[in-house]
Image (cartoon, helix red, strand yellow):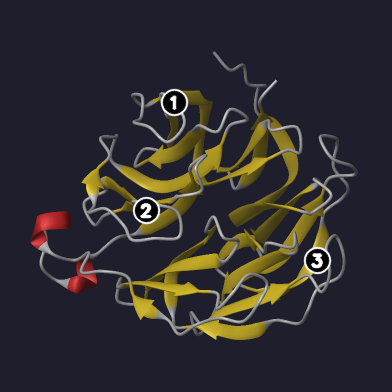
Amino acid sequence: MTNWSAWHNFDRKGKAIAAGRNQNGAQEVFLIGTDDQVYHRLQASPNSGWKNWEPFGGQGKVIAAGRNQNGTQEVLLMGTDDHQVYHRWQVSPNSGWSDWDGFGPPAQSITAGQNQNGTQEIFLIGFYRELFHCLQDSPNNGWKSWELFDEYGSREVFGIEEKAMGPNAIAVGQNQNGTQELFVIGKYDEVYHRWQVAPNSGWTEWKRFDSPPSKAIAAGQNRDGTQEAFLIDIHGQVYHSCQASPNSSWKDWEPFGDLKGKAIAAGQNQNGTQEVFLIGTDEQVYHRWQQ
């Protein structure tokens, strides 16, 4: 059984949070502050302590972090006024950043994944709660057009008909074999998931992921290759669930500490230990890590 540290104050308040990792293994956390400004914080060295928070540029409501095959990070941001999606990326590994550039349609939620072949794939819940995705043309390269991901709004999947009543939150993880797994929270606070049937390939149908009624979700991976999902239920309680073995089924959800939260993100240290970041109900950022 994996041991986790207690929750520790992460020295800032915020509204939304994302976690990424540089090519050199140092984690980097991206935060939308209570002032809607974007901030970031970098580990001083891999598997180590943290530098101070610094402004990252931009204003937003929702943020996500992805990674290119060459190790450069790419950050996605939903703007404060137009709900438009913007992105910026590192100009070289462990280095500086491009300017913000318009990227996608108006959004409610966004997440970034990576296929086994190294191409990033972005998943987005649109303004009317349609589900879109966008794939890179090739690793470290430009992007294809946005496309609807599926007919997620059908009664068979979410028990509803109106597309405006689709999923509320989204996260993506990766199995040990390189297949992506997508998680959504539906209109009625139920969690669903689907996964690629083979690396860089098509997807299964949506399956119900039995859980407490939920409002936020994140996905990470353990050193042994098993995925671990983290959610916040409608009362703010945090839970987690781990795969029984890599590329396999899931264990039951269990409480994950005594703090209550609003938003959650999962990162991974260079040594394979996970680190989870939580925005509490007091808007304070907290983190805990595997020991």
For badge 1, the amino acid type reads Ser
The residue located at (44%, 81%) in the rendering is 106
- According to the image, label 3 marks what residue? 55
Res. 281 in view: no
Query: Quick one: SS at disc 3?
Result: strand
Give the class, few, some or many, for how many residues have Cα within 10 Å of label 1's Cα (few <14, many ≥20): some
Q: Quadrant of residue 16?
A: bottom right
Lower position in the chain sequence, tag 3 or tag 2: 3
Q: Are marks 3 and 1 in contact (CB under 8 Å)?
A: no
Q: Is residue 107 left or right of residue 120?
A: left
Q: Position of residue 83 (x, y in %)?
A: 48, 79
Q: Position of residue 65 (x, y in %)?
A: 62, 60
Residue 89, quarter of the rendered image: bottom right
- Give the labeled residue for mark 2: 196
- Residue at x-position 74% and y-position 40%: 10
Labels 1 and 2 touching (C-beta < 8 A): no
Q: Residue at x 14, y 71 (%)?
A: 162
Considering the image in quadrants, where does the N terminus appear? Answer: top right
| Rendered view: 212 above or below 202 | above
Residue under label 1, please give it. Answer: 245
SS at mark 2? loop
Q: Residues within 10 Å of mark 2 (few under 14, many from 20)?
A: some
Disc 3 vs disc 1: which is toward the camera? Answer: 1
Task: Where is residue 206? Give x, y as percent.
Answer: 24, 52
Task: Return the x and y of residue 15 as percentages of the image width and height.
Answer: 58, 57
Question: Looking at the rendered structure, which numbered label has been put on residue 195?
Answer: none
Dot 3 or dot 1: first in sequence order is 3
Q: Residue at x 82, y 74 (%)?
A: 91
**Rendered position, 128 above or below 189:** below
Q: Quick check: 224 above or below 160?
A: above
